[in-house]
Amino acid sequence: MKHSYILKNTVFKKISPGQKIALFLDYDGTLVPIQKDPSRCVLPGEMKEELNSLADSNRCYLTILSGRSLPDIKGMVGIRNICYGGNHGLVISGSDMTYVHPGALPAKPYIDKAARMLSKEIAGIEGAWIERKRFTASLHYRSVRKGDVLSVKKAFCKVISEFSGGKRLAVIKGKMVLELAPDLSWNKGSAALWILNNLKGKYLPVYVGDDWTDETAFRALNKKGITIRVGKSAKTTANYYLKNQREVSEFLKRVKEFIV
């Protein structure tokens, strides 16, 4: 899909005076560069100041929508009175709205069992590790030697095959990560629409993300608002793109001029 470089585009004309914005932001790869160790993805002070300014505006409803667990993403961002979506939107927590997908808790035992099995399968592969996130579990292999990547993927497929019959688990593919999640018709796009539909008043949705998990939100919001991918890609369904986190920061400053 053809998409435009947003900082040179007239897209800001879509934001009319007095317009309220529902701003959805991914975290890793969008607000911060991706790191081998997710705990090192610390939000820069300048970026946090910009987010705080947007959060303080009564014309901006700010949501951080991440694959991280809800406590993790809240701790990484550290801004009160905004909305957070953890586990790709399976859990949502805002000052005036909360949601837990009804299928998340019943699937947790299967996630836990699969994660334990995976831990055993990859025990001898240096650099591979499992991140437990309550309702999902991620197999990270960014630090694995190239020659061992195939072994990691085979181990993952072996474990997944044990759960395929009942369709209890789904696979989410990210950047050098394979994630186990409940097999539900729910994703970041579903979560963004749920949040948007529960807001009082009319809001223009603006979604910024970098991963394939964000494509569900791009598709859900394309005809309703502004969708932006961080990193140019011919395969994305987003209407616009930004090159990197520095440009995300610049974009947020431009948005702030319209609504603060």
Image: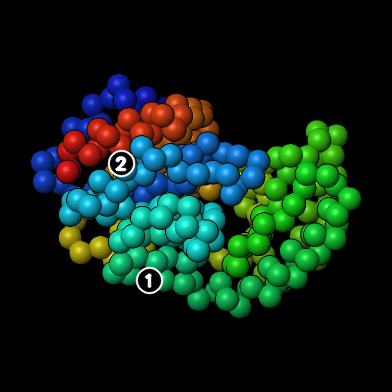
Q: Nearer the viewer, residue 204 or 26?
A: 26
Identify the residue at image location x=45%, y=47%: 26
Indicate left or right for 155 with 7 as reference. right
Alpha-carbon span between mark 1 and mark 2? 25 Å
Furthest toward the left, the residue is 17
Q: Nearer the viewer, residue 37 or 1?
A: 37
Whether pointer 1 and pointer 2 mark residues with C-beta atoms closer than 8 Å, the reply is no
Q: Which residue is mark 1?
A: 98
Type of amino acid at the residue the image marks with label 1: Thr
Q: Secondary structure at mark 1?
A: strand
Q: Nearer the viewer, mark 1 or mark 2?
A: 2
Identify the residue at image location x=57%, y=76%: 105
Q: Secondary structure at mark 2?
A: helix
For the N terminus, give its image quadrant: top left
Q: Is residue 236 above or below residue 116?
A: above
Q: Which residue is mark 2?
A: 50
Residue 226's x, y, as percent? 31, 40
**Residue 149 falls in which quadrant of the image?**
top right
**Residue 12 falls in which quadrant of the image?**
top left
